[in-house]
Amino acid sequence: MREPVFYAVPMTHAVFSRWVYGFFQFITTSWREGDVLGYRPPTIVHLARQQLVDLFLKSDCQWLFWIDDDVVPPPHALWQLLSHDKKVVNGLVPFKEPPYNPNWYLDPIYDKSRDTWTYEGFYNPPSDKLVKIDSAGLACSLIHREVIEKMEYPHFTLDAAAEDHSFWRKVKDAGFELYGDPSVQCIHMGIDGVSAGHWLAYQEMYRLNPFSINGPQLVKDYNEFTREDHTLAVRAYKPEDYTDDKAHIHYLTRDAKMGFADSIFRLGEVDEKLVLIVGDALGTVAQGMRDSNDITLLRDKVIDPKFAEQRAGVKTITKYKGKFDVVVILDEFGKLEDAQLDSEIRRISNTVKLGGVVYFNVHNKSHHAPNWNEHPDLPNRLKAQGLEMTHFGGSELSIAMRKP
């Protein structure tokens, strides 16, 4: 007889009927006497998760099994994860969007440019054995009570790394390792259900993306150009570990495996335009657009602009000036205070030709409070400066148009 399990389902939106069917198949295979099913109606996800942890701690259950309301574990998931005799173990959940990478990560990084933790690269797992990872989504995660009881309270907070990454940092601070089982392959529900098979099939296609980046080679080239010793990012577990003598390169230049190339795939639609790019210090995005467009970069305050000028063959400017058909803003709008954001939007709008387009970056709001890392009134702020928001991207670039 196994120890009782608390199945925790944070509800963040209306669920697909296919999820209900898949979850029923899973739960009927897994359920035993003493188990508890906990859920919370739609709310901000980190609040829902903390409420569920509190309910778990009041129960007699020894295992907490997270299942997101858009993820269907295979029927054998619980039994397979329990078989490893680990305190913390995850199933494999692919992202919904190309390149469908597993939501597993390695190498925690403190990125000073955004004052946030992030993780360098998706983990491409082997097909049949348990692997050690540094972070993951919480969509299919089995955690023993001992871990939860030793963690700092509250277990969930909202910071720039999203609620799941901050949770796993606390798990590691409590002295536990995180594992992933690639044989527990879940379906991530969207308009279509995405499985690990999508990720495997996409790998060959991904090589052809014009925005793919070989991060280590890029840094090597930049170091040779500047005769300095830069790194992709400062690998630090806490921000206070950062030291200015360890220079780091702009965060958009990480390894291609991060899927960055696919978050900006819409830029491939831009053709024969005058383009201004902001936040592309090394010209990596410019390289993917330069063959069919006239590209100008807004200079970074730290990175030597001559590297981008020579490597990507583009012009650089020190401030917003001129008129462009397309303006690409790769820095997150949500990191700006209200007055600073309005000023930035005004400068952008004045730079875009009538009928021109702005591609811009906002945070994936499914894991964040609406007023935390993005501005809920952003469409109105854009509109006040003559920009009509036409597409919210979430995990990809959003779009606004300069009204004629």
Image: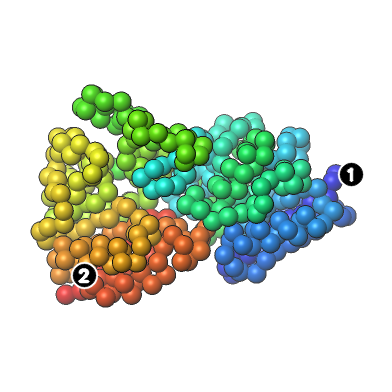
Residue 252 falls in image quadrant: top left
Residue 156 falls in image quadrant: bottom right
Please give the residue where the numbered disc 1 appears in the rendered image: 1
Mark with earlier residue (1, 2): 1
What residue sits 54% from the left and 56% below the top? 158
Separation of residues labelled 1 and 2 (CA atoms): 64 Å
- Going by the numbered disc 1, the residue's amino acid type is Met
What residue sits 22% from the left and 55% below the top? 270
Q: Is residue 207 visible to the viewer in this orientation of the structure?
A: no
- Examine the rendered structure and indicate whether residue 89 appears above or below residue 274: above
- Going by the numbered disc 2, the residue's amino acid type is Arg
Element under label 2?
A: strand
Image-based side of 63 in relation to 384, left or right: right
| Residue situated in front as seen by the camera: 64 or 233 | 233
Element under label 1?
A: loop
Q: Is residue 403 visible to the viewer in this orientation of the structure?
A: yes
Q: Position of residue 187 (x, y in %)?
A: 59, 52
What residue sits 21% from the left and 28% below the top? 226
| Residue situated in front as seen by the camera: 383 or 180 | 383
Please give the residue where the numbered disc 2 appears in the rendered image: 402
Contact between marks 1 and 2 (CB within 8 A): the answer is no
Image-based side of 93 in relation to 87, left or right: left
